[in-house]
Structures are given as structure tokens and as C-alpha cells.
Image: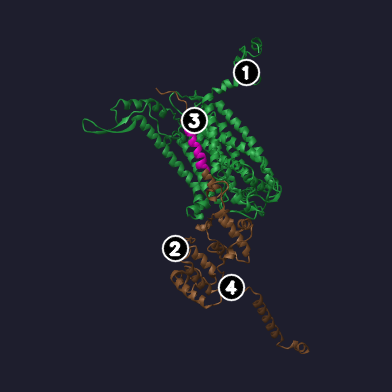
């Protein structure tokens, strides 16, 4: 590595201008850099700045639990046999001695009772999956309520949404694999849902199951989907998601010195390398601890699947719970059309609402962007209270989701709260329509109340609790003015005005009729930013006027 | 034989044949019909029946009538058998505290002798299932738990849950948890079908299978150490989801807050 050759071949590499690497480490890095060119990549990215807030680490929980799932999943594939061939159990778990079961179930029993650490790994895999989807949902809610999905991050929002949906379905396929009584019931449920699709349902069912339920194809097919197809797509989306996070840079909370054009925080190297690396082990530790403490999916207790058997408490894992709720509360309507073709509305309608619940949240950024007509880039987060309509819509969505979860667990609510199963079902039927509306209005009023409180705080300061008697006998409470930094944070948000309809006549006096779409948009925009949707934040004049007054109010 | 054949066209021949046929059917039925388990009225038993009748008059007759004939508030007890009394009173369900969707089990206030006396009285009203002996509900088969498990998943789990933890039925009714239920009572419940439970008489479920189910229930609710750690109530994915959210994600968010709070910060002046 002479200085002359270095200068001629790659002038951009400062390492090559050195006559001799200082130590072996540098020599090694130099060798790698000469072949991969990582220096420039590292230079531009290792000092990448990330802002600091606990809620920005929710996505990290997703990432790490995904890694844990992959690591433990690989271990499980070494021992799992995705086969429906029938075997008779003769293993260490005597309560199933001599019982007929599929090889899939038998090998899961083998993993749980004979493979060293198998049960712990299985439980880590399953608990991490529950935590993974839960963390994705909470991460998505964080992004939603802070408005972090706005331009330029809409595409990344969709990537994240796809990861959530794929995660849900991969979870479903995963817990269907052991072929235990619960999972078999779940597959039977899915088969029923497919059959309820008009015209193509029976064909899809036949293609998927390779014949009548349950057949022998479904477990091997689910296995391929579960370990290969969906995780592959997810891995690609995950990388794209992270690249976009790097490319867009991270959003940040409003504060002094924080603008739409900068990121205030700490560099990836060394601060976040250490923090994120440490956090990975903390996540792994917490999930492992839970897996060592609590059982998940005790397949030995469920027993092997047989289509003539079923257990109560046959619910899906929580993330599919809202679909269970939809189906449980739907009246069992059935109609006959075109001379004897049955339309099973009791299953078909829930099946249609199920994706709509999800899609509603996926397309929200585009709807909000269209309504508000906001084309600017946003890197400063909204406090949820400063976007009352968005916050209320999000809360309404969550309430809908929770109502459906109650419907999905109606039997457990009935037994544990000593209620009638029927009453809960009726409540959910009404609540499906009513609760989100009520929650919307309450949340919106709540946000407006908080905005008023902020305004009050900016103009009058914090209540100090000190009561002062003035010379003329009046009692007043002393208010402490806020620090300049707090004043900035409380007033940094902008308050857009509603989109106005174009003038009824154009500059030549010709009548110009606004279309239905434009009118709807103006109405919605009024709802978002109009009179009743935000409290005008204090202006500098108001503040000065009050400051110049008596010092109390 | 000639005499008989000569009179076969007698006007009364048809009547005679009919009578013979009826006598044969009745006789055959009497010979082969399952013997009803009506108890012989020994003197010790009639004493118990008298005592039982007194107890019945105090504790049960307000709903079931003085002679167990039933009323608008309670069903007739004719033919329910001593096993039903032993189950209902022994688990504290009867006397009922109040009418409702289902009568819950509570503390039993009668001694076993008193229960036996009431059972004797009710059994005297009409034949029905009898209180089982210990051999009847104690399995001797080495593999009874596994066989019982299969039977349980086929016949019981749809209401009582895979681990006997109970489950909801319509309109406030429920299948109770089988935790800590006496094997005798499990057997009696299957035999008599109390409240909303269907009955499984020996004709549909032989005694041997009942024994196996009892063995499985005892095993799954009492003896089994859970291999995976806390069973979380053995209620399936609902409690798992709740646990995962609270202790899984909850703990991780707490950790995230802790990590975010501990960072390299510029020293405050």
C-alpha cells in the first residue's frame, strides 16, 4: 500500500494516504474498505443524529422482537415436522400415551418435552410474536397520534401497515402449525370464512386444502407460508422501512432550537449504538423472562386436533381477536339467491368488515392530506391535543377495536364478570356503532380542553399555590410565568385554516360551480380546522399585553 | 295336536292367540328388561326415609313440594334418584339461595348422613340413579388419564374447557370449573345431568369411560404440574394476550422509558 498507488487509484480514501496502518485493527478495516467501500457509507451514517424520546423506541421493540422470532424460529424448524401423517404417541407426557395424532403435533410435543430447551424456545417464539404485533400496533399509534405519518412519510406508513398485517397473518399461520385442538379449530374457522365467499369460496377452499377439510396438505403448506413466504416479504419491507427512516431522518418533538430543517439529538455512533444494542438485550431478556415464567399455547393440554372435538375458550391470539369479535356478534343471517345458492351473510359481512377496519387506518394519511391540502414536509411532531379531530378519530378507531375484542372474548367476560353472554353480544352489536362516535366526541372535547389549559398556562403561568393579599385587601393567587423554553414548546404548533371553496364567480364574473367533491372537502376541512376544532393559540400581542398588566389574573 | 288344529277356525281362536302373544311379550319383557334399581324396603332404610322426609320438609319442600312432586318454583324429584340428591346437596347447590339462571355451588351445610337420608327419601319416590360406590368412580386402568382425556375432549371440553376450567353458556348460564370437585360428584353429575348439563347414563357412556373421565379431570385440575410455568388460568389465548400486553409490552415500554431517561446529556450549567 504505497502512497503513490493509493493516490492514483482512490483519492477519496484518506486511509490509503497513510504510509502504514497504525495497528492490526486499522489494517483489517483498511482491507475491508478497499473491497467494500464501507468508509463513505459509515462516514455518512454512523454520525446520523437521532432525537431522544422513549416513544421513539417502540419501533425498536418491534425490530428486536422480530429478530428474536427469527432466531428462535430457526431453532424450531430444526425439530418440527410439518406433516399430517398419523402417529401414535409414546413419549414422556403420559396423559397423551397411546393417543393418535399428526406428526406435526407429535414433533411439537417432542420439542416441548424432549428437546433440550425446546419448550423455552417455543415459548420465547410465541411470546415474542404476541409482543411483536402488540408493539407494532403501539408504534403505529405513536406515529398516528403525533402526525408523524405526514409528508414525506406516507409511504413508510404504508410499509409499516403492511408489516403489521403480515405479522398478524404470519402469527395466525404459526399457531396453526402444531395441529393441536385449538389451532385446528382456528383453521376450521378460516375454512368456514373462505367458504362464505360467494362463487369463488369453494374453489379457494379446495385449492388451499387440496380437498375436503382437513386433508393432509394444510400443515405443510402453512409451514412454507409461515417460515418462508411471509417472513421473506416482511424482511424486505423491514429493510425498506428502516432505509426510509434513515433517508427521511427521524421526527422530533417541538422545542427550542428544533425546526423542520434540523434534527436535534445524539449520534448513532457511539450513543445509539450502545443504547440500541443494550436495548436489544433488554428486550430479549424481558421476553425470555416472561417465557420462563408463563406458559403460552399449552398444546399438551389442548390435545391433538380431531374435527369432532372442540374446547370452549377457542379464541385466536389477541391480534386476530377483533375478527373473532366480528363473527361472534354478527347475527347468523343467511339468504338464498339465484335459485338455491346460499349466501352466508353471518360470515360474509364480518369477513368484509375485517379488512375494512384495517384499511381505514392504512389510508388515513392520504385522506388527511387530501382534506387539509397540506403539501409541506413535517418533521416536527404534533402533540395529540393540537390535532383534536385526528386524535379523536384515532381514539374512536381504538375504541372500535376494543369493543370487538370484548366481543371476541364474550364468553370469558360472561364467566368472569358474571354477566349474560347474550347481553354482552347485544352490547357489542350496539357498541360497534355507538361507542366510536361517543369516544370521538369525548376525545375531541378533551383535546380542546387541554388546548385551553395550554393557552391559560402560556398567558397566566403556572398556579404557584401562594395566596397574596394586596394592600387594598384583595386576595390573589400568584402565578409563576413559564420559562421561555416552555412558552416556545406550548406555542410552536401551527394552526392551519380550513380550505376555502373557490369564489362562486371567477375573475370574469362567470359562475363557477364547486363540485360535490370540493364541497365535501371544504366541509371536512372545516371540521378539521374550523371554529369548533381548535382553540386559537395565544399570540405574542396577547402575551405582551398580559405581561404588561398587573402580574396577576 | 289334532284337537288344537281342529279348533283353529273357532270364533274365539283369534282372541286366544292374541292373549297368548300378549302374555309372551309381557313375560319376555319381565324376564329381559333392565332391572330397575328400586331399593328393597328394609327397616333401616325406611328409618332413613322417615328422617330424610323430615329434612326434606324443612329444606326442600318450599320449592319441590312436600312429597317432592314439584311446584312452579322447582321441578318434580320423582325419579331423579339418590345420586342427584347427593350431588346437588353435597356440592351446596341445593337448597338454592335464590332463583336465577343457574344455581351456583356454595358451602354445604348438611352432614353426609343427612344427605344420605334425604337421598333415601327422594329415591323412595321413584327409581333413579344411585349414589355410586368408590369402586365405580376410581379408575384402575393404568392409561385411564389418556383415554379419559380423549373422552373429555369429545364430550365435555366444549363447555367445561380443555382443562376443566368451565365456560359460558347462554343467558347467564355456565359450565362450572371442575377445580377441586370430588370424584364422586363428577361421576354423579355425568350420571344425572344436573341443571344445564346433559346426562350421560350408562347406556350412552359406560361406567368404565366415566371412570376414565373422572381420572382425567382429577389429573388436569389437581395433580398436573404445568410444564410451561404459570398456566394463566388455562383459559386459552385471551388471558395470554392480556398477560402479553401488560407484562410483555408493558415491561418493555417501562424499560424503554428507563433507557431514554438515562442518556449522555450535556451538563446543565
Q: Which residue is mark 3?
A: A502
Chain that the image shows in brown? B
Check chain identity for marks 1 and 4: say if they share one: no
For the residues bearing labels 3 and 2, Cβ distance under 8 angstroms: no
For the residues marked 3 and 2, what is the alpha-carbon distance in whole angstroms?
Answer: 73 Å
Q: Which circle marks residue B97 in the picture?
A: 2
Q: Which residue is mark 1?
A: A27
Q: Is residue A474 above or below residue B41?
A: above
Q: Which circle marks residue B37 in the picture?
A: 4
Check chain identity for marks 4 and 2: say if they share one: yes
> Residue A224 appears in which quarter of the rendering?
top right
Q: From which residue to which does the magenta span run? A: B244-260
Residue B20 appearing in the image: yes
Q: Name the chief secondary structure element in magenta.
A: helix
Q: Element under label 2?
A: loop
The picture places residue B103, in percent across and down from the top left corner, at: 48, 62
Q: Colour of chain A?
A: green
Q: Element under label 1?
A: helix
For the residues marked 1 and 2, what is the alpha-carbon distance in whole angstroms?
Answer: 86 Å
For the residues marked 4 and 2, what is the alpha-carbon distance in whole angstroms?
Answer: 32 Å
Total marks in image: 4
Amino acid at each position: 500500500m504505497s502512497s503513490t498507488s493509493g493516490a492514483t487509484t482512490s483519492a477519496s480514501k484518506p486511509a490509503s494516504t497513510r504510509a502504514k496502518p497504525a495497528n492490526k485493527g486499522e489494517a483489517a478495516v483498511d482491507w475491508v474498505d478497499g473491497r467494500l467501500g464501507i468508509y463513505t457509507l459509515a462516514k455518512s451514517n454512523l454520525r446520523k443524529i437521532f432525537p431522544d424520546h422513549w416513544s421513539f423506541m417502540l419501533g425498536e421493540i418491534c425490530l428486536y422482537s422480530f429478530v428474536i422470532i427469527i432466531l428462535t424460529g430457526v431453532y424450531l424448524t430444526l425439530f418440527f415436522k410439518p406433516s399430517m401423517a398419523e402417529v401414535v404417541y409414546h413419549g414422556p407426557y403420559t396423559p397423551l400415551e397411546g393417543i393418535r395424532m399428526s406428526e406435526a403435533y407429535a414433533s411439537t410435543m417432542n420439542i416441548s418435552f424432549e428437546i433440550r430447551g425446546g419448550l423455552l424456545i417455543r415459548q420465547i417464539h410465541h411470546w415474542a410474536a404476541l409482543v411483536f404485533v402488540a408493539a407494532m400496533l403501539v408504534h403505529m399509534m405513536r406515529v398516528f397520534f403525533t402526525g408523524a405519518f405526514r409528508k414525506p412519510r406516507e409511504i413508510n406508513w404504508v410499509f409499516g401497515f403492511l408489516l403489521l398485517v403480515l405479522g398478524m397473518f404470519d402469527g395466525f399461520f404459526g399457531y396453526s402449525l402444531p395441529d393441536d385442538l385449538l389451532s385446528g379449530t382456528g383453521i376450521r374457522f378460516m375454512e368456514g370464512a373462505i367458504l362464505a365467499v360467494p362463487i369463488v369460496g369453494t374453489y379457494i377452499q379446495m385449492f388451499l386444502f387440496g380437498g375436503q377439510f382437513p386433508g393432509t396438505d394444510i400443515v405443510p403448506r402453512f409451514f412454507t407460508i409461515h417460515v418462508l413466504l411471509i417472513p421473506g416479504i416482511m424482511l424486505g419491507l423491514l429493510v425498506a422501512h428502516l432505509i426510509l427512516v434513515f433517508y427521511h431522518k427521524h421526527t422530533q418533538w417541538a422545542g427550542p432550537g428544533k425546526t423542520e430543517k434540523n434534527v436535534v439529538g445524539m449520534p448513532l455512533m457511539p450513543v445509539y449504538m450502545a443504547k440500541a444494542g443494550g436495548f436489544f438485550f433488554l428486550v430479549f431478556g424481558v421476553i425470555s423472562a416472561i417465557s420462563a415464567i408463563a406458559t403460552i399455547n399449552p398444546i399438551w393440554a389442548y390435545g391433538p386436533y380431531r374435527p369432532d372435538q372442540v374446547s370452549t375458550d377457542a379464541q385466536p391470539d389477541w391480534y386476530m381477536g377483533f375478527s373473532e369479535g366480528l363473527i361472534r356478534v354478527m347475527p347468523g343471517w343467511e339468504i338464498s339467491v339465484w335459485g338455491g345458492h346460499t349466501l352466508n351473510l353471518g360470515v360474509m359481512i364480518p369477513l368484509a368488515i375485517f379488512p375494512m377496519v384495517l384499511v381505514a387506518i392504512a389510508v388515513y394519511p392520504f385522506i388527511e392530506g387530501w382534506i387539509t391540502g397540506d403539501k409541506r414536509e413535517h418533521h416536527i411532531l404534533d402533540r395529540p391535543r393540537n390535532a383534536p379531530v385526528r386524535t379523536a378519530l384515532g381514539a374512536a378507531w381504538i375504541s372500535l377495536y376494543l369493543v370487538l375484542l370484548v366481543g371476541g372474548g364474550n364468553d370469558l367476560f360472561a364467566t368472569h364478570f358474571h354477566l349474560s353472554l347474550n347481553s354482552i353480544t347485544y352490547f357489542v352489536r350496539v357498541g360497534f356503532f355507538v361507542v366510536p362516535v361517543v369516544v370521538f366526541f369525548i376525545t375531541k372535547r378533551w383535546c380542546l380542553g387541554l388546548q385551553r389549559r395550554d393557552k391559560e398556562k402560556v398567558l397566566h403561568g403556572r398556579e404557584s399555590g401562594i395566596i397574596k393579599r394586596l394592600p387594598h385587601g384583595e386576595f390573589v393567587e400568584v402565578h409563576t410565568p413559564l420559562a421561555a423554553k416552555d412558552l416556545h414548546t406550548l406555542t410552536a404548533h401551527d394552526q392551519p385554516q380550513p380550505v376555502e371553496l373557490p369564489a362562486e364567480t371567477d375573475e370574469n364574473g362567470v359562475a363557477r360551480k364547486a363540485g360535490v367533491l370540493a364541497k365535501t372537502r371544504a366541509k371536512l376541512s372545516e371540521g378539521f380546522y374550523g371554529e369548533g376544532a381548535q382553540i386559537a393559540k395565544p399570540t405574542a400581542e396577547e402575551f405582551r399585553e398580559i405581561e404588561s398588566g398587573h402580574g396577576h389574573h | 295336536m289334532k284337537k288344537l288344529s281342529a279348533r283353529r277356525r273357532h270364533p274365539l281362536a283369534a282372541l286366544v292367540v292374541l292373549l297368548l302373544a300378549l302374555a309372551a311379550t309381557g313375560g319376555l319383557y319381565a324376564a329381559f328388561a333392565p332391572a330397575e334399581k328400586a331399593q328393597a324396603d328394609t327397616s333401616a332404610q325406611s328409618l332413613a326415609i322417615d328422617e330424610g322426609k323430615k329434612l326434606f320438609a324443612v329444606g326442600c319442600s318450599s320449592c319441590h313440594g312436600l312429597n317432592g312432586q314439584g311446584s312452579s318454583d322447582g321441578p318434580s324429584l320423582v325419579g331423579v334418584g339418590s345420586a342427584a340428591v347427593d350431588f346437588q346437596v353435597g356440592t351446596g347447590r341445593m337448597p338454592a339461595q335464590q332463583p336465577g339462571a343457574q344455581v351456583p355451588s356454595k358451602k354445604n351445610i348438611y352432614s353426609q348422613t343427612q344427605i344420605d337420608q334425604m337421598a333415601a327419601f327422594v329415591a323412595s319416590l321413584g327409581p333413579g340413579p344411585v349414589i355410586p360406590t368408590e369402586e365405580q368412580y376410581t379408575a384402575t386402568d393404568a392409561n385411564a388419564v389418556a383415554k379419559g382425556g380423549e373422552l373429555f375432549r369429545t364430550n365435555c371440553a366444549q363447555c367445561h374447557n380443555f382443562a376443566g376450567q368451565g365456560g359460558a353458556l347462554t343467558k347467564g348460564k355456565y359450565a362450572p370449573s371442575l377445580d377441586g370437585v370430588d370424584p364422586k360428584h363428577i361421576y354423579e353429575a355425568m350420571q344425572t345431568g344436573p341443571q344445564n348439563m346433559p346426562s350421560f347414563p350408562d347406556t350412552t357412556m359406560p361406567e368404565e369411560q366415566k371412570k376414565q373421565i373422572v381420572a382425567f379431570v382429577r389429573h388436569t385440575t389437581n395433580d398436573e404440574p404445568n410444564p410451561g410455568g404459570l398456566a394463566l388460568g388455562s383459559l386459552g389465548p385471551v388471558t395470554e394476550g392480556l398477560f402479553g400486553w401488560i407484562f410483555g409490552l408493558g415491561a418493555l415500554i417501562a424499560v424503554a422509558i428507563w433507557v431514554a431517561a438515562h442518556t449522555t446529556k450535556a451538563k446543565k450549567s
